[in-house]
Image: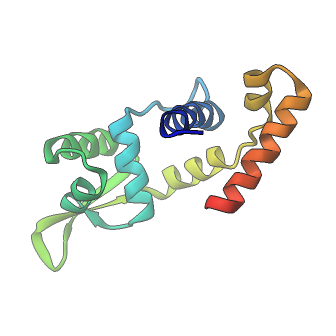
Amino acid sequence: MDGGQLHQLGKRLIELSSQVTSEDSDLSLTRGEAAVLEYVIEHPACSMSAIHRRTGRSQSHVSESVSRLKARGLVEVASDPNDGRRTRIRIVDGALQAITRHSARGIDQVIGYATSDPAQARRATDLLEELADLLL
């Protein structure tokens, strides 16, 4: 495997994970919103500047994404009690619970559709589990 194949595999795994963790009724997020939300989940009460630095998204893009996420009721925005000029962002409890439920969905059905052969699907799932054990 070379770097190009690894990149293609990564993109394909992201597509498959999106299929597993979302449903037609789920709220869809842009890639930027998803990156911001993921960072906020991992770093509760983080600042806009921290999100900007860690995600590589522009400051204006982070602000827009946070505003949209707030409008959807997914995050809360509050002033930093130690520095009123700074804004702190955290995920809303209900949103975190929904995301946790979605991320716990099994991959078998999506992998089965991707390979169309039950034996290959089981092998792919086993290999992904092994890879996760090795790299995560």
Please state if 47 lies on the left or on the right of 8 as rendered.
left
Is residue 47 in view? yes
Instruction: Say if 113 sits above or below 132 in the image.
Output: above
Image quarter for residue 77?
bottom left
Q: Please name whichever residue, 110 or 25, is drawn nearer the observer in this view of the structure.
A: 110
Furthest residue toward front:
2
Q: Residue, x 82% and y 46% (percent of image)?
A: 126
Instruction: Say if 27 sits above or below 59 in the image.
Output: above
Q: Please name whichever residue, 122 or 96, is drawn nearer the observer in this view of the structure.
A: 122
Image quarter for residue 116?
top right
Q: Residue, x 76% and y 42% (percent of image)?
A: 106
Instruction: Say if 71 sits above or below 48 in the image.
Output: above
Q: Residue, x 72% and y 23% (percent of image)?
A: 114
Is residue 91 in view? no
Residue 95 percent across, percent down from the top left: 49, 50
Residue 85 percent across, percent down from the top left: 8, 67
Image quarter for residue 118?
top right
Instruction: Say if 115 sits above or below 73 in the image.
Output: above
Residue 68 percent across, percent down from the top left: 29, 38
Residue 121 percent across, percent down from the top left: 83, 32
